[in-house]
Image (cartoon, rainbow, N blue to C red):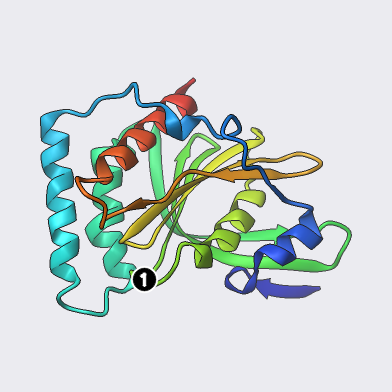
Amino acid sequence: METIPARDINLRYLIDKFGIQLVREPDFFTEWQDDSLSLSNYDKQLLDKIKEGYFNLLNYPPLLEGVVRQAIIDPLLFIGDFYLAPFYVKSEESIDIEVPDEDIIIKGRIDTLVLRDQLWVMIIESKKASFSIEEGLAQILSYMLGSPAQSNLTFGMIATGSEFIFVKLVKGNIPQYGTSKVFSMRNPGNDLYDVLKILKKLIKIASI
């Protein structure tokens, strides 16, 4: 049985072994586009503090993965109520994914996993601020493919500290995935407002 670290997996491998397909049509991943949710002024103040903290951390490089989680990801999950029932959070969760019809297992550890009963609501892969979100895409998709949840639908988020992107995976005979636009700390205003709205939207979907 061959074992491959998830961090060594690329998109070409997932295409060849799992047949995964990218769907670029806007109507495939509509969940991130819903702007009906509103944030309280208090939430916005907290998000503004996270953004200010990020720019302060840039003055003391390197901005490593652990710091990204502590200063940005964890506060976002707290504000989004992911630590409250019926949700709970696991960190550094191990996972094995078997490649169909081959003696190969992909092994890896998920940075942050948000659960509701046995439903995997969100898999969050945090990277160093200097990394591109593309470096985490194949890894997070491999984790999502290995989800034991009964639902064929799984959501994920990649956060580098400077950028955020949401991923939707629909499993089946031919797994399909789509991505949101990229939200950036460098954009005018505060893109964390939109990131939190999407997180709250996913909470509502998982609670149905």
Q: Position of residue 148 (x, y in %)?
A: 65, 44
Q: Amino acid at mark 1?
A: Lys
Q: Position of residue 19 (x, y in %)?
A: 79, 53
Q: Residues within 10 Å of mark 1 (few under 14, many from 20)?
A: some
200 on left or right of 172: left
166 on left or right of 130: right
Q: Give the answer, above or below, for where 151 lies relative to 22.
A: above
Q: Position of residue 170 (x, y in %)?
A: 66, 38
69 on left or right of 104: left
**Which residue shows up at 38% across the image and 53% down it?**
164
Displayed quadrant of residue 58 = bottom left
Identify the element where label 1 is drawn: loop
Displayed quadrant of residue 105 = bottom right
**Which residue shows up at 78% across the image and 55% down it?**
18
**Which residue shows up at 64% across the image and 33% down it?**
151
- Residue where numbered disc 1 is placed: 128
Check the picture and name the quadrant holding the N terminus.
Answer: bottom right
